[in-house]
Amino acid sequence: MAHYTPAETGDSPQEPSEKQAWPEPRTAWYAVSVFAIALMFAFLDRGIMTLLVEPIKADLQLSDFQISLLLGFALVVFNAFVAVPASRFVDIWPRNIIITVGIAFWSTMTALCGMAQNFWQLFMFRMGIGVGEIVHGPATYSMMADFFPREKLPRAIAVLQLGFIGGLGASLLLGAFVIQMLLGIDNVRVPGTDFVIRNWQLVFIIVGLPGLLVAALMMTVPEPPRRGRIMTQMKKPLPLRTVLKYLFTHWRLYAPQFFGLAIAAIESSGVRAWQPVFFQRTYDWSAQKTGLFLGTAFIIAAPIGLWLATWLTEHYAKTRDDANLRVVAIAYTLSPILAISGPLMPNPWLALLCASGAFLIGIGGAVPQNAALQSVTPNEMRGQVTALYLFIFSVIGGGIGPSFIALFTDYVIGDEMLLRYALSVSAAIMMPIAAWIMWSGVKHYGTAIAAVKIREQTEGA
């Protein structure tokens, strides 16, 4: 892999940061636990709305397409303009402070969703959630790579993914519990005004405000020393054009990871947004029953997927430099079988079994996928490169996925009760393409990791 020189940044060289001692394991794993809690609340705040689709549609008189905008596009529209520029500061500013501010902001926006009285107010507050999360991912993964050596990073990311699981599971289980709790409560009218807070709005307030405590907890995580730089000690963010030049120079390494993720994210984001609604419409399950069984199934399946993926990655890593991306490609190859067939099952229990299996494989693939990117990206670019990576996941996947399914339901099938076919077709189109793209990058990724190992040995890592 090509290295950039001090002349390109105007700074002075520094000794290789790999010679620094790694943080104490206790400190590193404490940081991961807090990251996981923060990630759980991020996906809880994002995902709680999937159980509230029907009452929101009824109260605000919305179409499936408008709901899809709230589920996906509203969360990512702001990212399209500021995510990558903002991430430049992840590479020079204290990342723990950046994450803290983000958590506090998106939690406040979630609570404010409980005050929305129409589509556009709800859209703006949902957009605020996305704004708060803009640099959360880049800052978190950048810190993770400075807390753990490359060979231990997949396991650490597997633990981090427990936060993702917790967020999805909590959005379903906690959502089901809160909805049940609020069933007998009448709408709340603010005294002296016409302002009404409906039952579903109380759910947003209840799940949003505790995030402020998580923001305070994040302040206890120390900022680790930066390592893995190939240039200099920087005093200002690396120009985006330099990062893009680096990515284009190494396009065979990065293009499969980026584009494979983009295609897969359209399918996975669409499923996350519409799967609870699918069980309600297709099998006549209530929101509470859907949340209970779907959340429980995911919480059981996901740790198994994380363990299997971590074990397989570490097994391959003993003999192969391409271990991380190879396991991702395997996951992308297997998951379509269940993702396509699940929505077509004749009863909800078989559909739930398929959904659990697809989630098990998908969440397992996310572990080496994130580790792969961090392992080959120079430290001074990690924030921006990760932001570009997550931009693709969020803006392309999160922005297009829910609307792709809604458009198919509204304008191709023409019947919202046939949502199952939109979910199945989405998986049949997207996942085989994503698998082919990811396999095309496995060889080049292995070559890049071999080069990184040689550089570390030369520098005395």
Image (cartoon, helix red, strand yellow):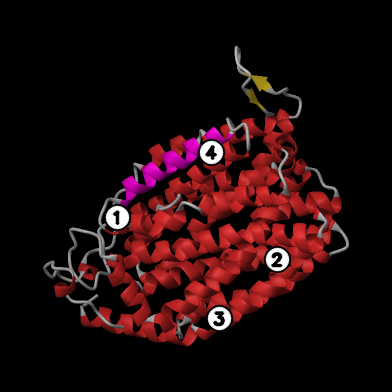
- Tell me residue 65's x, y (percent): 69, 52
- Tell me residue 261's x, y (percent): 53, 70
Above or below: residue 174 compared with residue 18: above
User: The N terminus is located in which quarter?
Assistant: bottom left
Secondary structure of residue under mark 4? helix
Span of residues in magenta: 95-113
Secondary structure of residue under mark 1? helix
- Circle 4 residues within 10 Å: few <14, some 14–19, many ≥20: many
Q: Does residue 60 appear in the picture of this structure?
A: yes
Q: Amino acid at mark 3?
A: Ile
According to the image, label 1 marks what residue? 89
- Tell me residue 325's x, y (percent): 50, 77
User: The C terminus is located in which quarter?
Assistant: bottom left
Numbered label attached to residue 437 = 3
Give the Cα distance between marks 4 and 1. 25 Å
- Tell me residue 110's x, y (percent): 53, 38
Secondary structure of residue under mark 3? helix
According to the image, label 4 marks what residue? 110
Numbered label attached to residue 357 = 2
Give the Cα distance between marks 3 and 4. 36 Å
Q: Amino acid at mark 2?
A: Gly
Q: Earlier in the sequence, mark 1 or mark 3?
A: 1
Mark nearest the camera among 2 and 3 is: 3
Q: Does residue 378 appear in the picture of this structure?
A: no
